[in-house]
Image: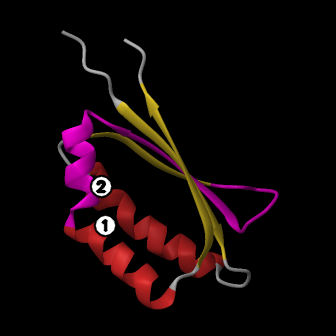
Amino acid sequence: MSVAHIVLNVFMEAVSGREQELENELRALLAPTRAEQGCLAYELHRDPENPVKFMFYEKFKNESALDEHVHSAHFQKFLAYRQSNDPVASTIVTRWRTVV
């Protein structure tokens, strides 16, 4: 039986002047997220024409794997950081499901 993977495109725009700070925080998520058992892809991109814009391409094995990611210590640390000192001006999350 095929499993429909969960795919997210997360678009973030940094507060002007805080682009590098946001990039550093997002880079800190890469290694621990990629090490998660249910993570199939976790790629960070930056707009070459507008450096305040970032995009994650995320692919998780299933809903359970995404839930584990959202509740992981490293992601919770990022959310806590955003609550206290948010370098993000806007976020748009588009959720996809692989067609099987």
Residue 64 placement (x, y as % from top left) = 19, 41
Q: Residue at x 42, y 84 (%)?
A: 83
**Rendering quarter of residue 50:** bottom right
Label pair 1/2, CB-CB below 8 angstroms:
yes
Q: Residue at x 23, y 50 (%)?
A: 67
> Where are the magenta residues, as a range?
46-72
Q: Is residue 42 left or right of residue 70?
A: right
Total marks drawn? 2
**Residue 44 seen by the camera:** yes
**Residue 38 seen by the camera:** no
Check residue 45 for magenta coloring. no
Quadrant the N terminus occupies: top left
Relative height, residue 18 to residue 12 (above, below)? below
Relative height, residue 96 to residue 58 (above, below)? above
Q: Amino acid at mark 1?
A: Phe
Q: Residues within 10 Å of mark 2 (few under 14, many from 20)?
A: many
Q: Residue at x 72, y 85 (%)?
A: 17
From the viewer's perspective, is the residue at label 1 or at label 2 nearer? 1
Relative height, residue 83 to residue 30 (above, below)? below
Q: Which residue is mark 1?
A: 75
Q: Is residue 46 left or right of residue 78?
A: right
